[in-house]
Image: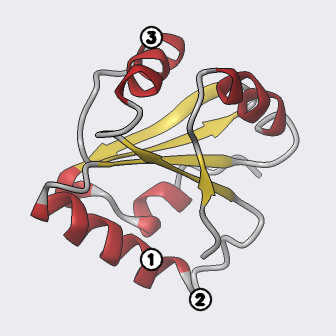
Amino acid sequence: MNWHPLTSAEQINTLIEESKHTPVVIFKHSTACSISSTAKSRLERQWDGASVDHIKPYYLDLLRYRPVSNEIAEVFQVQHQSPQLLLIQDGMCTYDASHLGISIDSMKKNIAV
């Protein structure tokens, strides 16, 4: 899994455009939260071998970039959670999971073909 850091609100427009060609995920992570660390580790383990290499994964450090998370919540009409995984396709959030509900298998069921 090759994370792409999400550090500015300007990047949201870029990933929206990318999502029109290939699915994009945003993982919002709190480095101070053990549940968030567990969810991140599970996600990384599930990612390998899950046939999702065509999906571009973005990583957002919530403690450093909370305003970016707020912008994501507004743009995609989702409630802020931590940890949280969002699947973005065609400029819209089509999957939203948080805490230990984050699952690659569940996310894959929402990928448009």
Image height check: is 69 above or below 46?
Answer: above
Question: Which circle marks residue 44 in the picture?
Answer: 1
Q: Quadrant of the N terminus?
A: bottom right
For disc 2, the marked residue is 49
Q: Nearest to the eye among marks 2 and 1: give it.
A: 1
Which amino acid type is marked by label 1? Glu
Q: Amino acid at mark 2?
A: Gly
Q: Residue drawn 13% across and 61% down?
A: 35
Q: Is residue 24 left or right of residue 107?
A: right
SS class of the residue under badge 2? Answer: loop
Q: Give the residue furthest to the bottom.
A: 49
Q: Residue at x 62, y 37 (%)?
A: 88
Report the mark closest to the observer, 2 or 3. Answer: 3
Separation of residues labelled 2 and 1 (CA atoms): 10 Å
Q: Residues within 10 Å of mark 1 (few under 14, many from 20)?
A: some
> At numbered mark 3, what does the secondary structure look like: helix, strand or loop?
helix
Q: CA distance from mark 2 to mark 3?
A: 33 Å
Give neighbour class at mark 2: few <14, some 14-19, many 20+ (Cα, 10 Å).
few
Q: Relative to 1, say whether 93 is above or below.
A: above
Marker disc for residue 74: 3
Q: Quadrant of residue 91?
A: top right
Q: Earlier in the sequence, mark 2 or mark 1?
A: 1
x, y (%) of residue 65? 41, 33
- The location of residue 9, given as percent across then percent down, is 59, 21
Residue positioned 25% across, 56% down in the render: 31
Viewer-closest of 109 and 48: 48
- Sequence-first tag of 2 and 3: 2
